Amino acid sequence: MRQISARQLADRLAAHADDPAGSARAPLLLDVREPWEYELCHLPGAHLMPMHTVPLRLAELDADAEVVVICHHGARSMQVAMFLERNGFASVHNLAGGIAAWARDVDPAMRHY
């Protein structure tokens, strides 16, 4: 499992958005926070799957896709990222510092909690 910083993720998402040919598939943004946290703030396009539901919903995820796992500060997402790797997911990243790092380093207008 690799770490990706908020700035690195923002650059990757921007590069994907600017790719007119669509040659690169955007990573799946897997938000493992609770629904109330997601409602406060989330990345556009993020897929909400609370941490405790991941084992039951694993079949909903594409093991061949690049996945970036997101939580508040990066601890829950790291656990989920390791779980995904143990279950055959080949390209998993943990958003280092979580959504809090995104709000601090990429989008200061994003709601903090």
Image (cartoon, rainbow, N blue to C red):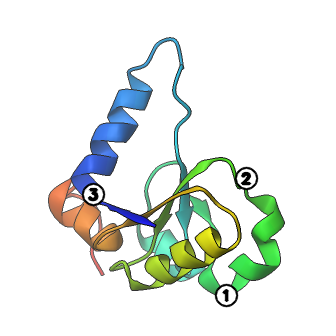
- Residue at which label 3 appears: 6
Across and down, in percent, residue 20 comes to 47, 13
Mark carried by residue 62 = 2
Query: Looking at this view, is 94 or 16 the one in front?
Result: 94
Residue pictured at 64% horizontal, 75% vertical: 86
Q: Is residue 22 above or below residue 98?
A: above
Residue lying farthest to the top in this orientation: 21
* Three-letter residue code for mark 3: Ala
Query: Looking at this view, is 4 or 53 the one in front?
Result: 4
| Mark 1 neighbour density, 10 Å: few (under 14) some (14–19) many (20 or more) | few
* Three-letter residue code for mark 2: Asp
* Three-letter residue code for mark 1: His
Across and down, in percent, residue 36 comes to 53, 81
In which quadrant of the rendered image does the C terminus lie? bottom left
Residue 72 falls in which quadrant of the image? bottom left
- Is label 3 in a helix, a strand or a loop? helix
Question: How far apart are the two marked residues, 2 and 1, measured between alpha carbons?
Answer: 18 Å
> Is 54 left, or right, of 48 in this rendering?
right
Labels 2 & 1 near each other (Cβ < 8 A) = no
Q: Is residue 18 above or below residue 81?
A: above
